[in-house]
Image (cartoon, rainbow, N blue to C red):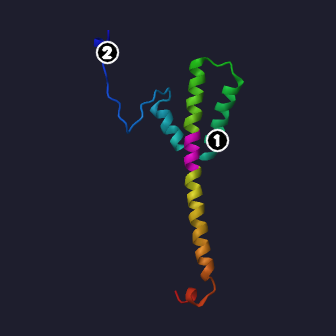
């Protein structure tokens, strides 16, 4: 039997995961504003917590929740980086605000 098995190479750079989410669903998630992602994530979590779903529907909700959570975290990280940069720029300009060197520019 082992002779009949086909061995396939798995790329180490790209994880191979089975997903019930279509490419269109992933693209839709990637375009959602944060607030809508958060609301849809809450709905997915509630659906799972309420139970009564088939195994297939539970997996779909879980995968949807994971995709929404990852996207939301990415958006929050981007916003945090922008805020940190703005605070750093503000702190740098505050050091020279109202000084002669600032007025000469």
Measuring from the top left, give residue 64's x and y in whole percent: 57, 32
Q: Residue furthest right?
A: 50
Are there few (<14), some (14-19), or many (20+) residues within 10 Å of tag 1?
some
Q: Answer whether residue 32 is visible to the viewer in this image.
A: no
Frontmost residue, 73 versus 40 = 73
The residue mark sitting in front, 1 or 2, is: 2
Residue at label 2? 5
The quadrant the N terminus occupies is: top left
Magenta residues (range): 69-75
Residue at label 1? 38
How many labels were placed on the picture? 2
Measuring from the top left, give residue 100's x and y in whole percent: 59, 90
Measuring from the top left, give residue 5's x and y in whole percent: 31, 15
Say which residue appears at 60% left-offset and 28% top-offset.
61
Q: CA distance from mark 1 to mark 2?
A: 44 Å
Task: Say left or right for 13 vs 64.
Answer: left
Task: Say left or right for 15 vs 63.
Answer: left
């Amino acid at each position: 039997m082992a002779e009949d098995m086909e061995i396939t190479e798995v790329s180490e750079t790209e994880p191979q995961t089975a997903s019930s989410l279509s490419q269109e669903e992933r693209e839709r998630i990637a375009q959602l504003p944060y607030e809508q992602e958060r609301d849809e994530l809450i709905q997915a979590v509630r659906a799972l917590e309420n139970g009564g779903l088939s195994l297939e529907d539970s997996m779909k909700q879980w995968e949807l929740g994971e995709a929404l959570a990852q996207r939301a975290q990415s958006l929050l990280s981007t916003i945090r980086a922008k805020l940190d940069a703005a605070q750093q720029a503000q702190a740098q300009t505050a050091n020279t605000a109202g000084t002669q060197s600032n007025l000469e520019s």
